[in-house]
Amino acid sequence: MKLLNHTLKYLSITLFVIISVWAAIFYINMLDEVYDSLDDGLDNYKLLIIKKAQEDSTILTRNEFAESNYEIREIPETLALPQKDIHMDTLMYMLNEEDFEPVRMLTSAFRLNNRYYELKVISSMVEEDDLIEDLFYSLIWLYVALITSIIIVNNFLLKKTWKPFYLLLEQLKQFKLGKDPVITPAETEVKEFKELNEAVGLLINRSLEAYNGQKHFIENASHELQTPLAISINKLELLAEKEDQTETNLIAIGQVIQTLERLTKLNKSLLLLSKIENKQFQDNEQVNINSVFKTIIEEFTDFADYKNVSFSFRENGQLLVEMNKNLAEILITNFIKNAIVHNIPNGFVRIIINPSSFTIHNSGSEVPLNQEYIFKRFHKKTNEKNSTGLGLAIVKAIANLYDLSIGYSYENGHQMTVSFK
Amino acid sequence: MKILIIEDEPELQEVIRESLEKENFLVETASDYTSALNKIISFNYDCILLDIMIPGGSGLDILQELKDLDKSDNVIIISAKDSLDDKLAGLELGADDYLTKPFHIAELNARIKSVLRRKSFGGKNTVELANLKLDLDDRTLHIENELLALNRKEFDILTYMIVNKNRLVNKTSLAEHVWGDHMDEADDFEFIYSQIKNLRKKLKESQAGVEIQAVYGLGYKLMVI
């Protein structure tokens, strides 16, 4: 739920309660005032009638309301004496309305010439149901008007006020570590938003610093490892050349050299990965993917023959892309190497090149790969000692750099499709 | 042939020196900018192995100095940084080759000899050993003046082995040299074996004066019979 609607929800509930309670109190008060005023009028009328009755005794014979609004009836003393002024609501048939309508009636008693009379004076009164209805509708309109104005204020004014916030939010959604552009918060006079912008800016700068530090750490560490690796491998090579070496020693030296070479590969792959992610491959040129494939397939022929894997290469068009040539070669090499290394004896590697994509289809394990993991660093499915577990991570890094999409599917083998935009 | 190693890491300096002395080169070393500068100003070398990151300055400045002094010493940069910019800058300043650490001794040998060959007088790019004569420009092999046809990989293997004669050539080094750096993850380089087998057969049939021996677990060695 949006913030605007959230406040609106609470406001509307609160307003509803306030208006309802206010309406009830207002109604009671108003009615009370109306009664008070009516009763005062009736009391006054009573005095006027009694006064008139003293002068004009014909009045005393009016024992029906008829056209006037009072009636006088003679009553015995016993009834008259305890009679107090009573104001009450009653119904009376109204000709104009053709219905019984509420009236206010004062019942009183007075003594005139030692005779006792009962006096009833009426006054037409507000119709309560009409009043309630009117009030109800007015309040509904008031409520609707209030809510509408709040919505309008929210949408126009608050939206304007919250603009820096939404702008920042939008930028944060787009933000990716290591990817430009950086966040540029909108100018604002609101203290909270200023603080938010500052806090976000600080947080991002710190993250970027840590991220860059880490990026360069990997690169520097890899560089620093090169010289000790060179010394170790070269010393062992010289050691192996010593004439008095036994075969057992040579085998042991060979194994150590191989292990160091694995370390070298791992180090080189990490360095490469870090360089790709640090965008150190800048010079783009038009690369013909078809010819890159041909060159690399040629390089891998001996290896494929040895593994008994057959190649097929189909061109449905020329695939020309704008990218760094080295990276294009690395991308394709990694795919082909992967397709051969993870293949089965008498297996196949089929390469299909289309004008905007290429597909590598190869036999291998019969279980489809888990797409979530295959591009992760150091994710190894098998325990192959000659795999660094970085090949597809490098592929992914190159794909990310050039916004390429890599699709994987399993159908009589593994299929990887790289699409260029 | 005189070679100068400009490298600040004493142990690496030492292994390179030991390896080069086996090839009968005269080796001198310098481990910082000033001593390197003194040596290049005072002497001429056939080849200089130059590390870019040395204490007291940059290897690129040494290259600049060589250029300013109008010296035509061959320079091979050996750097821990596999950086295209450094490589281009180095080659621009007159370096002949660029080798990234870590490297195999056999590869260093091949590079040095290639550089020396390229700049040697006469400009004949040939290698001779026993009754073999390799022409590296025409990519042909003559044994006792008889042409022996080799495929591209056989020729590259033989060249690399001859340049590193009597030395142990690591199979990774051979694979990387002949098949390219991309082969680095191929299992154990067993696939090299079939090419070596064919090459051996051809050499034997043509009564070549050399043979390629396998060194178990490590690689191969070319010996003059």
Image (spheres, coloured by chain):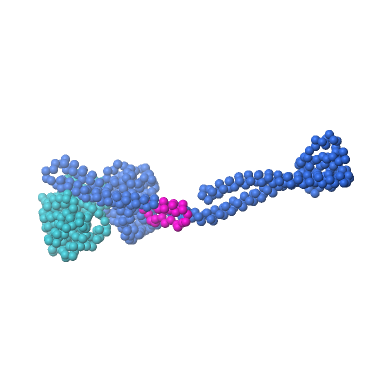
Q: Position of residue B167 (x, y in %)?
A: 14, 50
Magenta span contains residue A189: yes
Residue at 71 percent across and 47 percent down: it is A131
Q: Is residue B200 above or below residue A323?
A: above
The answer to whether residue A347 is left or right of residue A81 is left
Colour used to depict chain A in the structure image: blue
* Residue A233 in view: no
Colour used to depict chain B in the structure image: cyan
Residue at 36 percent across and 45 percent down: it is A373
The answer to whether residue B104 is left or right of residue A136 is left
Name the quadrant containing residue B139.
bottom left
Q: Which residues are magenta?
A: A173-201
Comparing A307 with A276, the one in front is A276
Q: Position of residue B219 (x, y in %)?
A: 18, 47
Comparing A7 with B95, the one in front is A7
Magenta span contains residue A140: no
The answer to whether residue A191 is left or right of residue A30 is left
Q: Position of residue A388 (x, y in %)?
A: 29, 46
